[in-house]
Image (tube, rainbow, N blue to C red):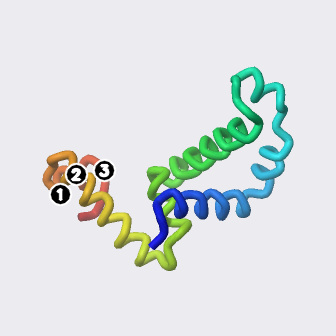
């Protein structure tokens, strides 16, 4: 299994290839805007891409990590299984019961 960072980069690449208008917009960013923020053009571009990715996840009612899973798993079944596994780990780390966590995050447990 690849590292989470690798999966996220793969998800970003897939997201970008599916959103051609965004790719064009990112390729034509104003370097002066990056400079005004004290960032390189690459850093500024990466930040805009992450913002668009997070907005897309939100539109689908997902966390960004869930969209990453969705774009990098082989099937809808694999996505759901991995998604629930991560949510269960988060519930345990938060010291919450699974039922309480499911209610909080609108999950079918």
Separation of marks 2 and 1 at Cα, in angstroms? 5 Å
Q: In the image, residue 1 lies at what x, y percent? A: 45, 73
Q: Is residue 18 left or right of residue 3?
A: right
**Which residue is disc 2 drawn over?**
101
Q: Residue at x 59, y 58 (%)?
A: 9
Q: Nearer the viewer, mark 3 or mark 1?
A: 1
Asked which secondary structure carries label 3, the reply is loop
Residue 105 marker: 3
Q: Residue at x 83, y 26 (%)?
A: 32
Residue 8 marker: none
Q: Residue at x 70, y 23 (%)?
A: 37
Q: In the image, residue 70 lies at what x, y percent? A: 50, 66
Asked which secondary structure carries label 2, the reply is helix
Residue 41 or 80: which is nearer the viewer? 41
Mark 2 in CB contact with mark 1 (< 8 angstroms): yes
Image quarter where the C terminus lies is bottom left
Q: In the image, residue 79 lies at what x, y percent? A: 43, 71
Furthest residue toward top: 36
Mark 2 in CB contact with mark 3 (< 8 angstroms): yes
**Which residue is disc 1 drawn over?**
98
Q: Is residue 50 left or right of residue 103?
A: right
Total marks shown come to 3
Earlier sequence position, callout 3 versus callout 1:
1
Q: Residue at x 31, y 50 (%)?
A: 105
Vertical arrangement, residue 75 with respect to residue 103, above or below:
below
Q: Residues within 10 Å of mark 2 (few under 14, many from 20)?
A: some
């Amino acid at each position: 299994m690849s590292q989470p960072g690798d999966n996220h980069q793969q998800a970003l690449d897939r997201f970008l290839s599916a959103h051609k208008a965004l790719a064009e917009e990112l390729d034509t960013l104003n370097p002066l805007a990056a400079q005004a923020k004290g960032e390189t053009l690459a850093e500024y571009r990466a930040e805009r891409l992450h913002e668009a990715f997070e907005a897309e996840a939100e539109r689908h009612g997902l966390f960004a990590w869930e969209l990453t899973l969705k774009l990098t798993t082989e099937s809808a079944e694999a996505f759901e299984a991995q998604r629930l596994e991560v949510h269960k780990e988060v519930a345990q780390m938060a010291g919450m019961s699974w039922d309480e966590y499911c209610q909080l995050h609108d999950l079918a447990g």
